Image (spheres, helix red, strand yellow):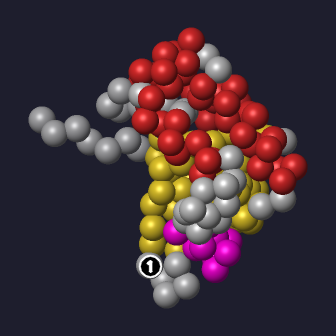
Amino acid sequence: MRPDDPAVREILRRSMVARLATVSRNGRPNLNPLYFVLRDDRIWLGTVDASLAARNVKADPRVAVLFTPEHDGPGAPLVRVTGTATVRTDRAVTRAYLRADARKYVLTPGGLANFFSHPRQARHMPTYLGSGDKGHSCVIEVVPVHAEFVAPPRQPA
């Protein structure tokens, strides 16, 4: 299935968290939940350049990204997108990501209520704005190659 298929795009539109699967230099798999936005048929995931996800993408650009609409509950459709990724640290891309991220996650009625009900989140803002001690903000840009629906995990009886 193509990543631009309308059914795939609908799942991506309704999903809030992407689960990025990467492989380290020594072949160890890793799965990271990250916020994401769609940009020009690419998937942008926000993180910092010192994160395991970014380091793994630099070592091996092959990735898989899993999406599921969280609000649909158990049995929600899952979409797996495979492709190649690069770590983007250029200021124009990180700023564009931060603007799109704010529109998707913060500048909504529910997002604002959540942000202000968790004031400790403010101390993490320097990291996301690129000046934290845990690395500089970056965007993992995924160029999707293939998409497929995956059966959701079975619920215990």
Residue in the picture at 26% in, 42% down: 154
Return the x and y of residue 107 as percentages of the image width and height. Answer: 65, 20
Residue in the picture at 75% in, 42% down: 97
Residue 45 to residue 89: above or below:
above
**Residue at the extreme top:** 109
Q: Nearer the viewer, residue 119 or 37?
A: 119
Report the amino acid beneath label 1: Arg
Residue 33 to residue 10: above or below:
below
Instruction: Report the residue marked by disc 1.
Output: 28
Task: Give the residues in magenta.
Answer: 52-64
Q: Secondary structure at mark 1?
A: loop
Quarter holding the C terminus? top left
Q: Nearer the viewer, residue 82 or 141?
A: 141
Return the x and y of residue 19 as percentages of the image width and height. Answer: 50, 51
Residue 118 to residue 61: above or below:
above
Magenta stretch holds residue 58: yes
Q: Is residue 152 left or right of residue 23?
A: left
Magenta stretch holds residue 60: yes
Whether residue 38 is visible: no
Q: Main secondary structure of the magenta part?
A: helix
Residue in the picture at 84% in, 53% down: 91
Return the x and y of residue 62 as percentages of the image width and height. Answer: 64, 70
